[in-house]
Amino acid sequence: MPQKLDVAYFTMEIGLSSEIPTFAGGLGVLAADMMRGAADIGTNVACVTGCWRYGYLHQNLRPDGTQNYEEISWDPSKKLKKLPQTVTVKVEGRDVTVGCWQLDLQGAKRSVPIYFLDTNIPENNPEDRDITKNLYGGDVGMRIKQEIVLGIGGVRMLRALGYDRINNFHLNEGHCSFLTLELLRERGFKDEDVRPSCAFTTHTPIKAGHDIFPYDLAWRIAGDQLPWHIKKLAGEDTLSMTQLAMTLSHDTFGVSRVHGMVSQRLLNNPRVGYITNGVHHLEWTSPEMRGLFDRYVPGWRGHPHLLHEHCRELPDDELWGAHQAAKKRLIDAVNAQGKVHFDPDRLTIVTARRIVPYKRPELLYTNLQRLREVAQGKLQIIHAGNAHPHDAFSQGVIRHIIERSGELKDAVNIAYLPNYNPDLAKLLVSGADVWLNTPTRLQEASGTSGMKACLNGVLNLSTLDGWWVEGYEMDPEAGWRIGPLAEALPTDEDTRKTDAEDLYTQLQYEVIPEYGYPKRERWIRRMKRAVGLMGTFNAQRCVEEYQAKAWTNA
Ligand SMILES: *Cc1c(COP(=O)(O)O)cnc(C)c1O
């Protein structure tokens, strides 16, 4: 039966839940929130992604801080519905058959189908069955094969499923740029017939995060699926997936205002705009906080923007009670490790994210003497975050943090919770008092965990980068900043020392005293302002903005 779609949303990864580990980090978690927001407002969208058997891996930590991994095996047949359709793509001249699984994501207004492409089927030889085994795994050649399956296979699969009219194709990061090649083929190789239906979002200001392939390898694997004028589209020297996406999209977006600006420079394209990310309000709010909003912000489930107008009506004692209930759950989880004893009434700082150098999770330990003076038994700190199995440097950062926590034992309790995943993230973003974020300026594209914290009345303490530039500007009472204002954004110089000093100063003179006041009036007022920000930084607003600016082809 012929079907129509307004938007086909392509993404290499999607992080719907800890039980479907087809994602590595924030990019996938964001894609899932986008689809939830779309299902709530009724966007006619379908998502195309990969059925990775191994995405995110289970992290274990040894007492000395060495991490090791277990692969989490999951069985798609237990979570997804197998579809009968198959399509083929060419890899190294062979036909590779691509199958598909479906999951329906139910929102307030509509159900959004998520299609997971899979080469692990009997028609394929063992080598090709492994194309959809490891997300971002293998060598450059494997990455090209995976992206052929996602981009070209994805468009063909949508056609096989009966979507004969698709108005807009969205490229969530450059991994899916090969979809434009299939559209070119469908439309007689006319660039101008493809461009109006494609929009592209770039997600990282780090150069290494952009896929670049040598042409000889790309030709050997993709063959004549690459059109004759590929160098005109994707770059003369190497095949840049970002360049290909920009050339064949009518618009390119960054994921926050600052990131849009940085991307203009990085991608040498003054036309890059931005749509600031958002998180799904129901997904990330603790049950206690949801109950409170149900009572005092009626309608917020369908209309999260109401959080902005009504956040001040939340009664102090009930807000604090809901927060403490969520906090108790987190403290219990820390204490259950049996290594340290945390106190539910002590100021608790959490810093949790994928461990990569630019996020600087160890910044707090730059000056141990200063930290001792500041903490004075008034602080407890929780870390979480996985390092990539091949990233020895970041694994060292985890060991470093755990060593510092031993040295500081007498002055401040520090815990490292293993295996950061969406379930643990929910516990952390609702149970913290302060959400600490310390990226090197201009390197955090958006960051979304701080938004999840706001939903729960948790206060951000963050360098001004990514979304927090806008959040802090909208309401400086909703949290604190570390380091200079956005206007004075330093670019290359090493700001580690000055940022660390400012972090200690903020803790000593702002954060710790405010938490310590007997009735915490000022603190609770800030909590409401944090909730208020989420009238803006929610997934629904984000999707609406995409509809207005990106998915405009009718
Ligand atoms: C929200 C989330 C992220 C992204 O958070 P950032 O602030 O961008 O680091 C990554 N991993 C998990 C499990 C999350 O829930």
Image (tube, grey):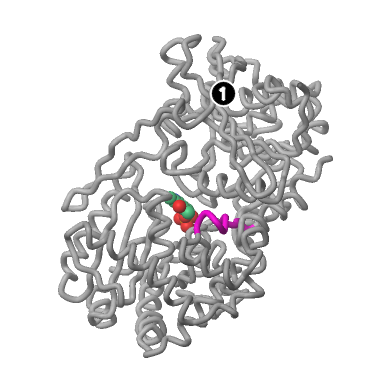
User: Splitting the image into 4 quarters, where does residue 10 fall?
Assistant: top right
Q: Residue 403: image x %, image y %?
A: 19, 60
460 left or right of 427 in image: right
Q: Which residue is drawn at 63% across and 29% down?
A: 178
Count of residue discs = 1
| Residue to which mark 1 is pinned | 100
426 left or right of 390 in image: right
Does residue 240 show up? no
**Looking at this view, is 521 or 489 the one in front?**
521
For the N terminus, the image quarter is: top right
Q: Residue 25: image x %, image y %?
A: 45, 46
Q: Residues within 10 Å of mark 1 (few under 14, many from 20)?
A: many
Q: Residue 129: image x %, image y %?
A: 45, 17
Does residue 162 show up? yes
Q: Residue 494: image x %, image y %?
A: 41, 66
User: Splitting the image into 4 quarters, where does residue 366 fall?
Assistant: bottom left
* In magenta segment, residue 281: yes
For badge 1, the amino acid type reads Cys
Q: Give the range drawn in magenta.
A: 276-284
